[in-house]
Image (tube, rainbow, N blue to C red):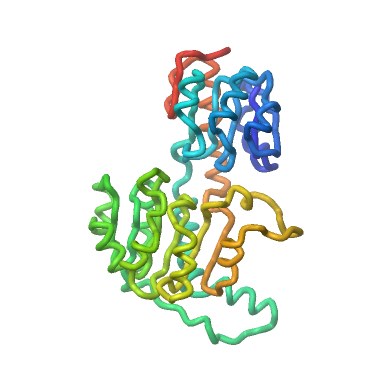
Amino acid sequence: MQVAVFSAKSYDRTFLERAAEGTPIRWTFVEARLSAETAIVAEGCDAVCAFVNDRLDAPALERLAGHGVRMIALRCAGFNQVDLEAAARLEMSVARVPAYSPYAVAEHTIGLILSAIRRIHKAYARVREGNFSLDGLLGFDLNGKTAAVVGTGKIGLLVAKLLHAFGCRVLLYDPYPSEEASAWGEYVSLDEALSQADVVTLHCPLTPETRHLIDAATLARCKQGVTLINTSRGALVDTRAVIDALKSGKIGALALDVYEEESELFFENLSDRVIQDDLFTRLLTFPNVVITSHQAFFTREAMEGIAATTVKNLIDFHDGKPLANAVCQQRIARA
């Protein structure tokens, strides 16, 4: 089984090759992102393996299908980058990695919260320049504060548990409440959660309903000086509205591991180039903003889990078995 891996980095190769040892999978690793223009690289492959910033729109899928590809193996949980209607029309199966170490993202979230409210990023830069002043580094205790966890799936559940351990009053919001999560917080409406929280952390999938969940209107309902964290999907947050809220002081600290236009930035070394995204560069000018480059998932344990599930999805397709992690599944399978 020949599989083209797009957006492939050295670490992808390491973990995927290790997970596929002893299987019929043969990899072709491609540094370029998948798009209609690069799909030709997959000619003769049975499947492609794609990541969060690969573009699997109808033109790309049509070209892949024309080259013989019948399966899309996503090495991520989200699948909003895939045109599922086109995939079904072209009789292509699509499978994802619905769960990998949720601890990776949950723990990174806590790290971002602590860095944002204690100005750790700012202190680190100062000390390296020989500046040991504490001016501008005043933070606040998490203990006794109110934290809103928006989205209580596996990651949100762990974040709620960790915030509870810090002594926070935890408010939860999710259209589908979890009995397990309710042990660590109280379910309330979104308006109630936002209006009472000192810290708001997002753990939602990106859907038409959640796109720009945080915008000017929802920010207006937040406390003055609220701390906002997003380690979920970039487009949950309206960047322009957030910049306005930073300027007015409505947002006291912001920490992001994702960004709505990240596809042209993240996972690449752009240190020798001028970044053309004016909104992103504006965010970087604020001293109370912490940004990491979509690395919350990036732990050894998570990468091993992602690789293992990706390989299982591919082997099940190869063997004609039902795909347990399918988001679009066809009867057609090729050995």
Q: Is residue 322 left or right of residue 54?
A: left
Q: Residue 14 at what x, y percent from top left? A: 67, 38
Question: Which quarter of the rendering shows the C terminus?
Answer: top right
Residue at horizontal 58%, vertical 34%?
A: 50
Q: Could you tell me which residue is drawn at 67 percent across and 37 percent down?
A: 13
| Residue 58 higher or lower than 190, as above or below | above
The reply to whether residue 280 is visible in this rendering is yes
Give whichever of 180, 173 is nearer the camera.
173
Quadrant of the image for the N terminus? top right
Q: Quadrant of residue 38?
A: top right
Residue 120: name its quadrant: bottom right
Q: Residue at x 44, y 54 (%)?
A: 106
- Nearest the eye: 39 or 52: 39
Numbered label tally: 0
Q: Is residue 165 left or right of residue 9?
A: left
Is the residue 89 above or below the residue 130 in the image?
Answer: above
> In the image, residue 119 lies at what x, y percent?
52, 74
Res 1 seen here: no
Q: Front-most of 46 and 59? A: 59
107 lies left or right of 278: left
In this picture, residue 109 sits left or right of residue 131? left
Q: Nearer the viewer, residue 102 or 92?
A: 92
Q: Identify the residue shown where x is 40% and y is 52%.
A: 203
Can you give x and y, in whole percent of width and height, for residue 286 in the image? 55, 72
Q: Residue 164 location, x and y as percent?
A: 33, 63
Q: Is residue 175 above or below residue 171?
A: above
